[in-house]
Amino acid sequence: MEATITLHVDGEKHDLTVDTRTTLLDALRDRLGVTSPKKGCDHGQCGACTVLLEGRRVVSCLALAVAHDGASVTTAAGLAEEGRLHPVARAFVDHDGFQCGYCTPGQVCSAVGMLEEAAADWPSHVTGDLQAPVRLSDEEIRERMSGNLCRCGAYVNIVAAIREAAR
């Protein structure tokens, strides 16, 4: 069965017809040619496909495209403004928070989303005081980014980049 949907991807409106079983990731990559989100595990375990869906981070390999008809999707590529890197992406470059780069778009989207969550004082599993404002310690950053894997092991630099971007 097919359905016609509209997705607003990185500020551009796209109307497309998809099989109702098509994931958001496959719609982005295969139907729209948006290659920033990567297909890693296809099981929601690695985070390489992370995008911002209506401003919240999601693993797009687990989201059905038809469930998000009319939604706004922002990829790492869409975070850049006027050809300038987003401050989080810039911090990743400055701190060498990537090696092969495969996971980087998902890491950057996840970091942007988690910084918004922390700014809104959403607690994580390691947040000590649920009544106090969230303080982004390295432990807090690691916990919030635990859904994004880096096979190259650039975690120390990723945490440093996010710490800088949070300032």
Image: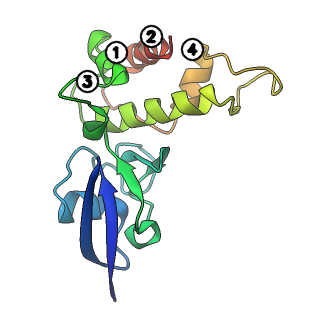
The reply to whether dot 3 and dot 2 touch (C-beta < 8 Å) is no
Going from N to C along the chain, the mark reached first, 1 or 3, is 3
Q: Is residue 107 above or below residue 16?
A: above
Identify the residue position indicated by label 1 in the image.
91
Q: Whole-Å distance between the Cαs marked 3 and 2?
A: 15 Å
Q: Amino acid at mark 4?
A: Asp
In the figure, residue 48 lies in which quadrant? top left
Going from N to C along the chain, the mark reached first, 4 or 2, is 4
User: Residue 142: image x %, image y %?
Assistant: 54, 24
Please identify, in this view, whether the residue under mark 1 or under mark 4 is nearer the observer.
Answer: 1
In terms of secondary structure, where does tag 3 sit? loop
Residue drawn at x 51%, y 31% as measured from the top left: 145
Q: Amino acid at mark 1?
A: Ala
Q: Whole-Å distance between the Cαs marked 4 and 2?
A: 11 Å
Split into 4 quadrants, where in the image is the N terminus?
bottom left
Identify the residue position indicated by label 3 in the image.
85
User: Residue 10: image x %, image y %?
Assistant: 29, 47
Q: Is residue 96 above or below residue 68?
A: above
Going from N to C along the chain, the mark reached first, 2 or 1, is 1
Residue drawn at x 39%, y 46% as measured from the top left: 51
In the figure, residue 119 lies in which quadrant? top right
Q: Whole-Å distance between the Cαs marked 2 and 1?
A: 7 Å
Going from N to C along the chain, the mark reached first, 3 or 2, is 3
Q: Amino acid at mark 3?
A: Leu
User: Residue 33: image x %, image y %?
Assistant: 16, 56
The reply to whether dot 2 and dot 1 touch (C-beta < 8 Å) is yes
Identify the residue position indicated by label 4 in the image.
138
Residue drawn at x 46%, y 70% as measured from the top left: 67
Q: Whole-Å distance between the Cαs marked 1 and 3?
A: 9 Å
